[in-house]
Image (cartoon, coloured by chain):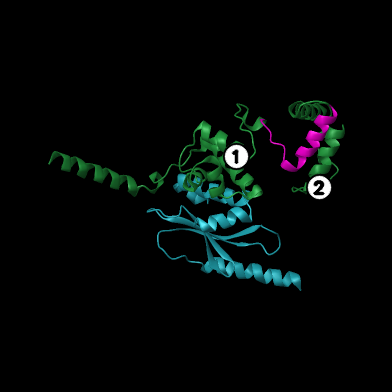
Chain colours: A cyan, B green
């Protein structure tokens, strides 16, 4: 995020605003963001926030999951600035697995 | 022929503009944090009341895309529009010069303030001004003892709603 702030301040501002929207809203506005295609469910509980929805200069994709510990809390797993269509969720999926592992450990 | 050349020039200009992704839509500068905060408040209130963008648009006699554009800072809203949005969501628009010194009482604490105002036959504003003045005055006079209204609570950064309410009640009881 710091790199983005330095190199693309306007885009950084947009990302910051979208994250604030996620934090200040609730499940109702979250579903609305899915309907408006600001958020894409990638399956297995992994979501992608895309800012802006489309742009020639690339979009920032933020990968996150719902916290298994706290109701309506989100865990941001990874972020990237991409120009291609497909999302690379390798790091995000790895971190998601880590979160699930630690949840299971805590349950035991 | 002249017209064709002009059109060609315009097309080139437009292409150059669209190469700059930052110009694709209106984005506020850091000086426009007040508008950003207002939009976030609208989203928060809509979320609480479970009012969709479409429903809000119907209340205002406009379309969902107008609300969506407004919430995504797609265009600068006018005073009349934000006043109507505030009223549709049961709020009251207030514009102030005081920036960070204009405080917002959390929703869950408002009934206590209203109760106090009713008991003392004062306006909400009067009660709040009194509470804040009294609290700041007490810090000023005894800085070592009263700098923190959460004093005595566990030493941690986050405080639960119950603790906040408890502290507010203590402050109101002073």
- Viewed as shown, does residue B162 lie left or right of B21? right
Farthest residue to the left: give it. B1
Give the main secondary structure of the magenta stretch.
helix
Which residue occupies the foreground of this view, B120 or B20?
B120
Instruction: Look at the picture and state if B90 lies above or below A11.
Output: above
Residue B82 appears in which quarter of the rendering? top right
Determine whether the residue tagged by mark 1 lies in a helix, strand or loop: helix
Which residues are the magenta region? B102-120
Which residue occupies the foreground of this view, A16 or B102?
B102
Q: Which residue is mark 1?
A: B88
In three-dimensional space, the C-alpha distance between marks 1 and 2, rounded to whole angstroms, equals: 30 Å
- Viewed as shown, does residue B92 lie left or right of B110? left
**On what subunit does the disc labeled 2 rest?**
B
Q: Which residue is mark 2?
A: B162
Give the residue at x 78% y 28%: B127
Q: Which mark is residue A74?
A: none
> In what quadrant of the picture does the C terminus of chain A appear?
bottom right
Determine whether the residue tagged by mark 2 lies in a helix, strand or loop: helix
């Amino acid at each position: 995020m710091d790199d983005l702030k330095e190199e693309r301040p306007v885009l950084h501002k947009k990302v910051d605003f979208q994250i604030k929207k996620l934090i200040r809203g609730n499940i109702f506005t979250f579903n609305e963001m899915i309907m408006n295609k600001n958020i894409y469910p990638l399956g297995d509980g992994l979501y992608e926030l895309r800012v802006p929805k489309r742009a020639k200069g690339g979009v920032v994709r933020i990968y996150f999951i719902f916290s298994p510990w706290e109701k309506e809390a989100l865990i941001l797993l990874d972020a990237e600035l991409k120009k291609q269509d497909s999302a690379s969720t390798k790091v995000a999926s790895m971190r998601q697995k880590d979160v699930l592992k630690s949840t299971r450990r805590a349950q035991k | 022929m002249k017209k064709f050349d002009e059109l060609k020039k315009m097309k080139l200009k437009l292409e150059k503009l669209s190469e700059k992704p930052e110009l694709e839509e209106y984005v506020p500068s850091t000086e426009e944090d007040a508008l950003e905060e207002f939009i976030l408040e609208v989203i928060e209130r809509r979320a609480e009341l479970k009012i969709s963008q479409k429903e809000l648009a119907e209340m205002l006699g406009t379309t969902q895309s107008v609300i969506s554009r407004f919430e995504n800072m797609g265009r600068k809203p006018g005073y009349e529009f934000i006043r109507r949005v505030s009223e549709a969501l049961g709020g009251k628009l207030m514009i102030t010069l005081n920036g960070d010194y204009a405080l917002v009482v959390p929703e869950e604490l408002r009934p206590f303030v209203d109760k106090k105002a009713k008991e003392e036959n004062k306006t909400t504003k009067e009660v709040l001004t009194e509470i804040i003045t009294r609290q700041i005055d007490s810090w000023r006079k005894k800085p070592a003892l009263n700098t923190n209204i959460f004093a005595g609570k566990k030493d941690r950064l986050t405080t639960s709603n119950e603790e906040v309410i408890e502290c507010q009640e203590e402050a109101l009881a002073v």
